[in-house]
Image (tube, rainbow, N blue to C red):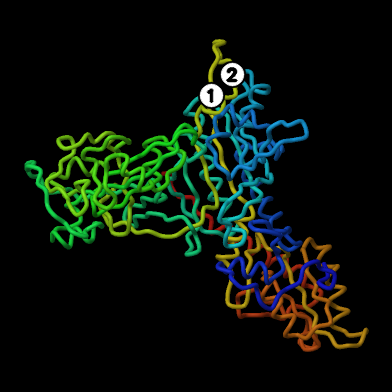
């Protein structure tokens, strides 16, 4: 490809308001252009890199037995109604009607479609196990797209689906994906970790997210450097500091003027926050959001409520802070609330509360609290479970050492779905005794555009992108430094070499523009192709072309007649470096 005919311009500056370096550089280097909020065009450079990423996805899926197919991006709403997700999923699902007034949706994912196909394509146990996948456009109407390709509304995803006889078969294919995903990310030059995660709207019994650690990430991860425990904060566990055992004392009113917060209450009574009970009032959407109910979460004052854990505990599709009116109607007083004497609502108590006697809690009266509040004696604890947020310094639940938190971007996820979707679709198979059995499904996703952005976030310097060879749009950036005359020796040599290198199997971007050397070098740094070849009168006088690896200072003069062989060897060397870096941690 000749740069003079390339579609897509480099920019000296990115638009204002860019928060991620990957976004800034992909815009400046001419890889992407924004069409609308969360909507991007992938220009030729990005398309070539995405193609290489998707080739890696295909190779690794095929390696573990995958069969590629294609499924529609437009779905009849009925298959989503059967699974219960049509009503459970909020406005992020794009719903519309066709000319016949039939309800349709734009695909967010394809579990329902695969389950529907199982009804017609899977009859016997002899057809299982199966692994199918496709690379397809998805749409999720995210309310807060950000950071370029890291969080968008329209995206391309490799989603694969496993079909098995039983839970054991699902576990085997789940672990095969776990290992394949690490190979994929390392082959793309991206270090990742796997963390336990919430199953969310997908449902099922287990899920892992593959996270790229970066300050621009929106997910908070909880990690233990001592034993390797890792989880998304949404589900992370920790060892809670036990309270000192003591006998329950009589309930006692105490005036606490102006002490509306835990910090104010602790300071006023001169007690640690761990000796208080905090009441958090929320409105929960139940039955797929069709019904609302007040939920009262009770947690020790030295902790915070984890809304994901709480939502899972009560089966809520969503939670939002309760209005003061709802709190008053339940018999509580905002700022001085507690579960004592509530007339309505579901009370969910953190599992640290029953083991923490004689806490201070609100008296449901302005400027008044109760001392010596005990769950079970003074109020019905309702549901008792872990609803606490894990944070820096908390003790690891596995080994007791301090936890730390880190930000990350989710670049892939895997789910053990079980029989939920097959049961909803009526998909069954006959076992070896002729009995009908449910199909066990797994679901596994990687967004190729987000992966591209994370590779760019990981591989850049102050001058621009520094692509790993495996995902670079081209192998070689060929830069002739020419004079004005048509017979210029460097220009003629570059034109000849462009064709020779292409014939040798190398993909070459030739900067044939009539630009100054400084402009060409700046654009080459910005675009970030791994192998740079400069041909000039000076290099020719020294015996050939100057070859340099992007991001490295050393260069070498290589004779023109052996350039194709030398560049092929260096390309292989760079790919081998990537393969040698592949690490697959123990499943856990």
User: Horizontally, is 230 left or right of 135 in the view?
Assistant: left
Which residue appears at 67% of the width and 50% of the height?
A: 54
Check disc 2: other Cα within 10 Å, few if <14, some if 14-19, many if 20+. many
Residue 575 or 343: which is nearer the viewer?
343
Q: Is residue 139 left or right of residue 561?
A: left
Label 2 sits on residue = 429
**Which residue is located at x 58 percent, y 70 percent?**
17
Q: Residue furthest top?
A: 434
Q: Residue 44: x, y in percent?
A: 76, 61
Left/right placement of residue 117 relative to residue 324 reads right
Q: Secondary structure at mark 2?
A: strand
Front residue of this view, candidates 446 and 127? 446
* Residue 5 left/right relative to 331: right
Question: Looking at the image, can residue 69 be seen?
Answer: no
Q: How many marks?
A: 2
Instruction: Please tell me whether residue 26 is drawn above or below residue 38 in the rendered image.
Output: below
Q: Is residue 475 visible?
A: yes
The disc label shown at residue 274, or none = none
Q: Are marks 1 and 2 in contact (CB under 8 Å)?
A: yes
Mark 1 lies on a secondary structure that is loop
> Residue 360: image x %, image y %?
16, 50
In the rendered view, would you say 319 is above or below 502? above
């Amino acid at each position: 490809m000749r740069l003079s005919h390339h579609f897509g311009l480099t920019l000296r500056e990115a638009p204002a308001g860019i928060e991620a370096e990957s976004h800034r550089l992909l815009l400046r280097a001419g890889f992407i252009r924004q069409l609308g909020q969360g909507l991007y065009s992938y220009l030729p450079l990005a398309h070539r890199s995405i193609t290489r990423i998707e080739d890696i996805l295909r190779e690794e899926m095929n390696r573990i037995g995958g069969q590629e197919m294609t499924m529609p991006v437009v779905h009849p709403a009925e298959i989503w109604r059967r699974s219960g997700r049509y009503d459970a999923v909020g406005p992020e699902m794009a719903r519309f009607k066709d000319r016949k007034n039939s309800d349709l949706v734009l695909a967010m994912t394809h579990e329902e479609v695969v389950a529907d196909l199982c009804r017609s394509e899977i009859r016997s146990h002899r057809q299982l196990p199966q692994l199918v996948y496709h690379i397809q456009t998805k749409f999720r109407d995210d309310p807060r797209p950000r950071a370029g390709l890291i969080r968008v509304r329209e995206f391309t995803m490799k989603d694969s689906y496993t079909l098995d006889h039983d839970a054991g078969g699902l576990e085997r294919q789940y672990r095969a994906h776990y290992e394949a995903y690490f190979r994929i990310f390392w082959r793309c030059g991206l270090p990742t970790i796997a963390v336990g995660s919430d199953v969310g709207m997908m449902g099922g019994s287990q899920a892992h997210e593959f996270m790229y650690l970066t300050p621009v990430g929106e997910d908070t991860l909880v990690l233990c450097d001592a034993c390797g425990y890792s989880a998304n904060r949404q589900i992370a566990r920790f060892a809670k500091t036990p309270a000192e055992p003591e006998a329950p004392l009589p309930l006692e009113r105490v005036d606490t003027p102006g002490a509306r917060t835990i910090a104010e209450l602790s300071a006023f009574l001169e007690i640690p926050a761990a000796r208080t009970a905090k009441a958090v009032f929320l409105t929960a959407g139940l039955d797929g959001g069709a019904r609302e109910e007040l939920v009262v979460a009770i947690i020790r004052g030295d902790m915070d409520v984890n809304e994901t854990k709480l939502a899972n505990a009560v089966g809520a599709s969503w939670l939002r802070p309760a209005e003061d009116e709802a709190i008053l109607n339940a018999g509580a007083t905002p700022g001085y609330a507690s579960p004592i004497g509530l007339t309505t609502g579901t009370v969910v108590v953190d599992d640290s509360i029953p083991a923490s006697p004689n806490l201070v809690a609100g008296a449901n009266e302005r400027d008044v609290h109760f001392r010596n509040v005990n769950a079970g004696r003074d109020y019905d604890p309702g549901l008792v479970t872990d609803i606490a947020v894990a944070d820096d310094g908390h003790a690891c639940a596995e080994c007791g050492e301090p936890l730390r938190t880190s930000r990350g971007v989710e670049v892939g996820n895997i789910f053990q779905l079980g029989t939920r979707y097959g049961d909803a679709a009526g998909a069954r198979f006959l076992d070896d005794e002729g009995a009908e059995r449910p199909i066990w499904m797994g679901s596994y996703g990687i967004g190729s555009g987000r992966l591209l952005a994370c590779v760019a976030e990981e591989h850049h310097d102050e001058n621009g992108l520094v692509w790993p060879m495996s995902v670079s749009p081209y192998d070689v950036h060929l830069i002739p430094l020419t004079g004005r005359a048509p017979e210029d020796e460097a220009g003629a040599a570059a034109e000849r070499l462009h064709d020779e290198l292409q014939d040798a199997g190398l993909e070459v971007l030739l900067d044939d523009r009539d630009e100054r050397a400084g402009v060409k070098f700046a654009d080459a740094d910005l675009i970030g192709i791994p192998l740079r070849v400069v041909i000039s009168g000076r290099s020719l006088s020294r015996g050939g072309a100057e070859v340099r690896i992007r991001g490295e200072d050393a260069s070498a003069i290589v004779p023109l007649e052996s350039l194709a062989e030398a560049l092929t060897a260096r390309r292989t060397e760079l790919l081998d470096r990537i393969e040698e870096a592949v690490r697959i941690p123990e499943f856990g």
